[in-house]
Amino acid sequence: MDNERYEAGLKVRKAVLGDAYVDKAINNATDFNRPFQELVTEFCWGTCWTDEALSRQQRSLLNLGMLAASGRMEEFELHFAGALRNGLTVEELRAALIQIAVYCGIPAGVECFRIARRVMAAEAAESPKPA
């Protein structure tokens, strides 16, 4: 394992997916799946997501489309929250979900919008309220 690439990947992974999610995934790793967690962190995040040829916003949009197209809705939910953390606007995300519905099918679009609504509601509930 390339420790430098792993550490860079860990930093980006936490920034996009949130410290709590990543810490739980890594801390709950067993001897069986620890090598997979290391692979995901080093290569997905340390190689792919640290490449500056694409912005984090662009990568988030790509992931949402690919995850929707492949029906990976649990990962879609995780990456939709990450897209918000990466600074994509509600308008940009809505446009992406409409495009997903056109190209992946209305049922996929329905599920993506359902997930998006749930994620945005959770984000709003967690946001500090002005005094």
Image: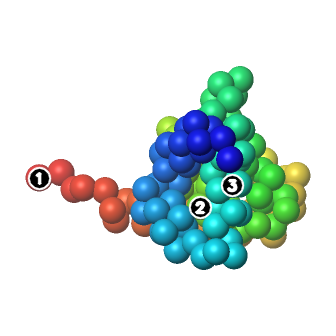
SS category of the residue bearing label 3:
helix
Comparing 4 with 95, the one in front is: 4
* Colour scheme shown: rainbow
What's the amino acid at mark 1?
Answer: Ala
What's the amino acid at mark 3?
Answer: Val
In this view, which residue lies farthest toward the left? 131
Q: State the separation of the CA atoms marked 1 and 3.
A: 41 Å
Is the Cβ of the residue at disc 1 closer than 8 Å to that at disc 3?
A: no
SS category of the residue bearing label 1:
loop
What's the amino acid at mark 2?
Answer: Leu
Say whether residue 70 is visible: yes
Residue 111 picture quarter: bottom right
* Residue beneath the point at 71% across and 54% down: 39
Comparing 2 with 76, the one in front is: 2
Q: Which tag, 2 or 1, sits closer to the chain's start?
A: 2
Q: Is residue 104 left or right of residue 43?
A: right
Q: Nearer the viewer, mark 1 or mark 3?
A: 3
Residue at image mark 2: 78
Circle 2 packing at 10 Å, graded few (<14), some (14-19), many (20+), is: some
Circle 3 packing at 10 Å, graded few (<14), some (14-19), many (20+), is: some
Residue 7 location in percent, x, y?
54, 42
Residue 6 location in percent, x, y?
60, 44
Residue at image mark 3: 40
How many tags in the picture?
3
Circle 1 packing at 10 Å, graded few (<14), some (14-19), many (20+), is: few
Residue at image mark 1: 131
Q: Is residue 107 left or right of residue 128?
A: right
Q: State the separation of the CA atoms marked 2 and 1.
A: 30 Å
